[in-house]
Amino acid sequence: EPEVTQTPSHQVTQMGQEVILRCVPISNHLYFYWYRQILGQKVEFLVSFYNNEISEKSEIFDDQFSVERPDGSNFTLKIRSTKLEDSAMYFCASSAGTGVYNEQFFGPGTRLTVL
Amino acid sequence: GESVGLHLPTLSVQEGDNSIINCAYSNSASDYFIWYKQESGKGPQFIIDIRSNMDKRQGQRVTVLLNKTVKHLSLQIAATQPGDSAVYFCAEKVGYGGSQGNLIFGKGTKLSVKP
């Protein structure tokens, strides 16, 4: 069964450093998403991406964040200068279509720890 | 602001019993509701969904009920098994404007199944 994969599973970084979180969406999917989950809290939407551009972003997704699809398979989230409060699980998701009724498939997540 | 929330943070049931997990939502414009299961160290996994023009939908051992009058959503798990132990999230999508892709998650209920 096709699945979304993410690397690394755990990333530890120093405050102020740049990190890149990587995702490989399901191969025939066209819509990609990043969510984050701070420990013990709910999953929060960050950004959606389609046709090589951002479709929608939340208030959390400020200028420190960027997304890219550098090739035909990877989808990345970059945090330019990490802060302590960026520590969270980051989930990538993909869907075949957009619109209200399209299921999003989630990856296993990357745990980001900022020291 | 409008949000999706859960009544009970934890639920403990005996193996074989039925489980009911509840969720309240406040956005009357929401068109689509999804229940996700999240096991430890994994991403959210789709369980079942329901559209706003329905009030009940059944899957394998799971049933989702939607009461739009009181803005309440529930997930019923029949004959709960130890493998059902996880955190369960409700999520909503709003089918208007540009917000057709991102999910709004509730905080989660932890289900523990005692053998």
Image (cartoon, rainbow, N blue to C red):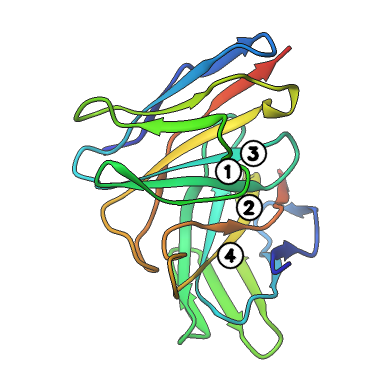
Above or below, B5 against B10 in this view is below
In which quadrant is the C terminus of chain A drawn? top right
Residue B38 circle label:
1
Task: Kindly state the secondary structure of the residue where label 3 is placed.
Answer: strand
Q: What residue type is labelled 4?
A: Ala
Nearer-the-camera pick, A64 or B81: A64
- Categorize mark 2 by other alpha carbons within 10 Å: few (<14), some (14-19), many (20+): many
> Is residue B15 at all visible to an observer of this figure?
yes
- Categorize mark 3 by other alpha carbons within 10 Å: few (<14), some (14-19), many (20+): some
Marks 2,3: beta carbons within 8 A: no
Residue A37 circle label:
3
> On the image, numbered disc 2 is attached to which residue?
B88
Marks 4,1: beta carbons within 8 A: no
Marks 4,3: beta carbons within 8 A: no
Q: How many labels does the image show?
A: 4
Indicate which label's residue lies in the foreground, 4 or 3.
Answer: 3
Task: Kindly state the secondary structure of the residue where label 4 is placed.
Answer: loop
Alpha carbons under labels 4 and 1: distance apart: 18 Å
Q: What residue type is labelled 3?
A: Gln
- Horizontally, residue B17 falls left or right of residue A70, namely right
- Horizontally, residue A115 falls left or right of residue A79, namely right
Indicate which label's residue lies in the foreground, 4 or 2.
Answer: 2
Nearer-the-camera pick, A50 or B105: A50
> On the image, numbered disc 4 is attached to which residue?
B78
Task: Kindly state the secondary structure of the residue where label 1 is placed.
Answer: strand
Chain of the residue on which disc 1 is drawn: B
Residue A53 circle label:
none
Marks 2,1: beta carbons within 8 A: yes
